[in-house]
Image (cartoon, grey):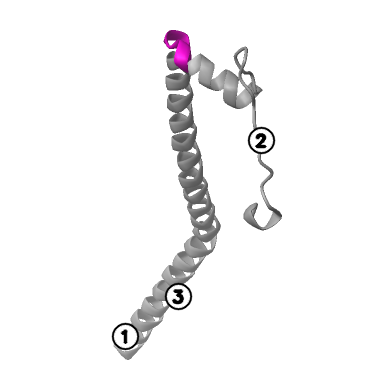
Amino acid sequence: MAENRRKSAVSTYLLLFVLALVFAAAAVLLLPVYRSYQKKQAELGTLNEQLNDKRDESARLNTEVSELSRSPAAVEKVAREKFGLVKDGERVIKYAVPEKDRR
């Protein structure tokens, strides 16, 4: 009877040892996969932010294009600001920005 108890205890300890090995092996195998998953999730978050920024920029540019296609005043504003064009008889006065104000 004592021998049966001893065999039972040994087999229980052996089973626990095997289960511990299985859990340890699973943890070792799954840890790199989990880290990779976390890295990809962070990258996805960054890309989603970039996508939202690009969508906002696209909406702004579409609005600007729409405004330029239907409003002569908008075209004139762009011509004056970006290209420095003036109407006949107008003068352009440019002021130099002091070095300390540029920062």
| Start-end of magenta stretch | 68-73
Closer to the camera in the image, 49 or 56:
56
Residue that label 1 marks: 5
Instruction: Name the amino acid, label 1.
Output: Arg
Question: Which residue lies at the image location 51% right of the left edge and 15% below the top edge?
Answer: 75
Residue at horizontal 51 percent and vertical 60 percent from the top: 31
Q: Along the horizontal axis of the image, is 19 left or right of 88? A: left
Within-10-Å neighbours for mark 3: few <14, some 14–19, many 20+: few
Which residue is located at x 39 percent, y 76 percent? 11
Asked if the stretch drawn in magenta spans residue 63, the answer is no
Between marks 2 and 3 in the image, the one whose residue lies nearer the viewer: 2
Q: Quadrant of residue 66?
A: top left
Q: Secondary structure at mark 1?
A: helix
Report, in whole angstroms, how far the alpha carbon at label 1 lies from the one at label 3: 18 Å
**Residue 64, percent across and down?**
46, 21
Cα gap from disc 1 to disc 2, whole angstroms: 100 Å
Q: Earlier in the sequence, mark 2 or mark 3?
A: 3
Left or right, residue 88 beside residue 31: right
Residue type beneath disc 3: Phe
Asked if the stretch drawn in magenta spans residue 72, the answer is yes
- Residue 32 horizontal/vertical position (percent): 55, 57
- The residue indicated by pointer 3 is 17
Magenta part mainly helix, strand or loop?
helix
Quadrant in the picture for the C terminus: bottom right
Give the residue at mark 2.
94
Q: Residue at x 29, y 87 (%)?
A: 1
